[in-house]
Amino acid sequence: MELKKNPKANVGRNSSLYFAVGLNVMLLLTYLGLEHKTYETEATKIDILMLDNQIDEDIPITTIEFVPPPPPKATQARKDVVPEIITIVEDVEDIEESIIQSTEVGQDDIIDNREVGVEDVAVTEVEEDIEVPFAIIEKVPQFPGCTGNNSELRACFERKIQEHLQKHFRYPDPAVELDIQGRVFVFFLIDKNGLVTKIKSRGPDQLLETEAERIISLLPKMIPGRQRDRNVSVPYSIPINFKLQTQ
């Protein structure tokens, strides 16, 4: 007779399931045990102070008597000083007082009503220095060597100025070393005597301005410009370019 085993009586058929459940339970308990926090508690004793009766103390009043200090010795010594006797001395010399007369005119003063004639007045004629711009003057200043009408004199004047600049132009050595370049505007006046005066300049550097003024100061004496048949001063301006040649 063959024995048959009941499948329900097999104890190890669900062993893997039980093992997995038990393992998870153990891991949960281990996690809770590690994460559990505990705190130390200390017993605190609280004492309560009860004041039944409040004691009132009377504070005694202190009186301070102020004694004035004794007077200084200097004050005591001054009482014994005898005052000095002042003696009045009469003046020996007689002083004459100077009387200052008033310069104001009173009602009783006589005013000199002298009549002044035209012959008694000296008339001095002051010659007025008139400046007429170069562009509108009737006759421009005449540069030495220039001839012709006003248009020819104007063109010759400008040409002679350019020749003068090229002839006397000299680049300052310090400006060359410092590489200073730029345009200098020079202003000057040809007065009624034909002389070049009131030279002024404006440029990028003092070295270039000084050289430009030196060149203009070498201009020769000219025949002055004329306006309405009289000599007048003529202002003039010219730019001078200072430029270094690069090789």
Image (cartoon, rainbow, N blue to C red):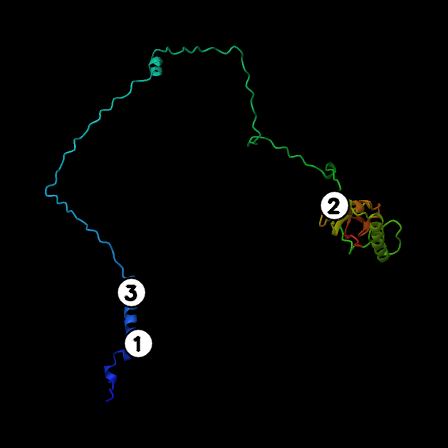
Q: Amino acid at mark 2?
A: Leu
Residue 129's disc number: none
Where is residue 21 drawn, in percent x and y? 28, 73
Quadrant including the N terminus: bottom left
Other residues around mark 2 within 10 Å, as few (<14) / some (14–19) / many (≥20) = some
The answer to whether residue 143 is above or below residue 18 is above
Residue 167 seen anywhere in this rendered image of the structure? yes
Residue 207's disc number: 2
Residue identified by numbered label 1: 16
The answer to whether residue 74 is above or below residue 195 is above
Q: Nearer the viewer, mark 3 or mark 2?
A: 3
Where is residue 71 drawn, in percent x and y? 31, 18
Secondary element type, mark 2: helix
Residue 197 seen anywhere in this rendered image of the structure? no
Q: Earlier in the sequence, mark 3 or mark 1?
A: 1
The answer to whether residue 58 is above or below residue 171 is above
Residue 30's disc number: 3
Q: Amino acid at mark 1?
A: Ser
Where is residue 78 drawn, in percent x and y? 35, 14
Direction from residue 43 to residue 163 in the image, left or right:
right
Spatial separation of the CA atoms under disc 3 and disc 2: 96 Å
The answer to whether residue 13 is above or below residue 164 is below
Q: Nearer the viewer, mark 3 or mark 1?
A: 1
Spatial separation of the CA atoms under disc 2 and disc 1: 108 Å
